[in-house]
Image: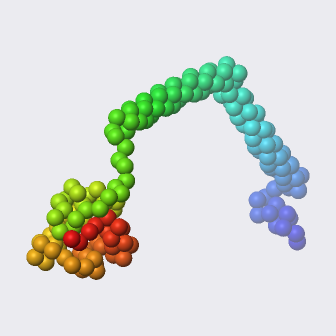
Amino acid sequence: MNPLERLAEKLSLTRAEILTISALLAFLLLGSILRTIQSSELEAAALQRAEAAMFSDAETDSLIQLAVRDQARVAEIVKESLEETASRRNRNEDKMARKAPKKPFTGTVVFNRAGSEELQQIKGIGPVMAERLIAFRTENGGRITTFKELLKVKGVGLKKLEILKKHLSLE
């Protein structure tokens, strides 16, 4: 006995009734499949219409106008910033022009009698280094006899010692 006959026997149905019910179920299944396909097509079409409406020409034009306005504002801000930078640069140049350019020191200074300002005239000697040199001189009794003694000062190396030899005398 096939499964269809067993089902007919259990449900007390005739073969014609089972075929009718099977046909109705097949039509029901086919209808639901077609409806699902149709609804997905309708959904896709609705999405396309919504996207088209979202980006309509009028809205696109208004977005372009907003972008142009924003671009104009950015251009104004950049222009103002450049003008401000240029005016700052001009003010700094004016200040630099007012200051007398510092000429490089070409003379010599007597180290055993030199003050801080005199030592600072030498290239590479700032206020801190000048004070260190004066402190070293006072620690050694106010005099030094050779330039090599200056190597004991913090910050004086061989290069700086060569510069000092050019501009210092040890009378």
Residue at the image point whose x is 82% and y is 61% from the top: 8
Residue at the image point whose x is 13% and y is 78% from the top: 140
Q: Position of residue 157 (x, y in %)?
A: 33, 75
Residue at the image point whose x is 29% and y is 72% from the top: 155
Q: Position of residue 104 (x, y in %)?
A: 37, 53
* 151 on left or right of 42: left
**Which quadrant of the view contains residue 42?**
top right
Q: Position of residue 110 (x, y in %)?
A: 22, 65
* 158 on left or right of 16: left
**Which quadrant of the view contains residue 117?**
bottom left
Front-lying residue, 37 or 163: 163
Front-lying residue, 100 or 78: 100
Residue at the image point whose x is 75% and y is 41% from the top: 40
Counting the numbered discs, the total is: 0
Residue 130 in the image: above or below residue 22: below
Front-lying residue, 65 or 75: 75
Asked whether the viewer can see residue 46, the reply is no
Residue furthest top as drawn? 58
Residue furthest front as drawn? 171
Q: Quadrant of the C terminus?
A: bottom left
Asked whether the viewer can see residue 97, the reply is yes
Q: Position of residue 46 (x, y in %)?
A: 72, 32
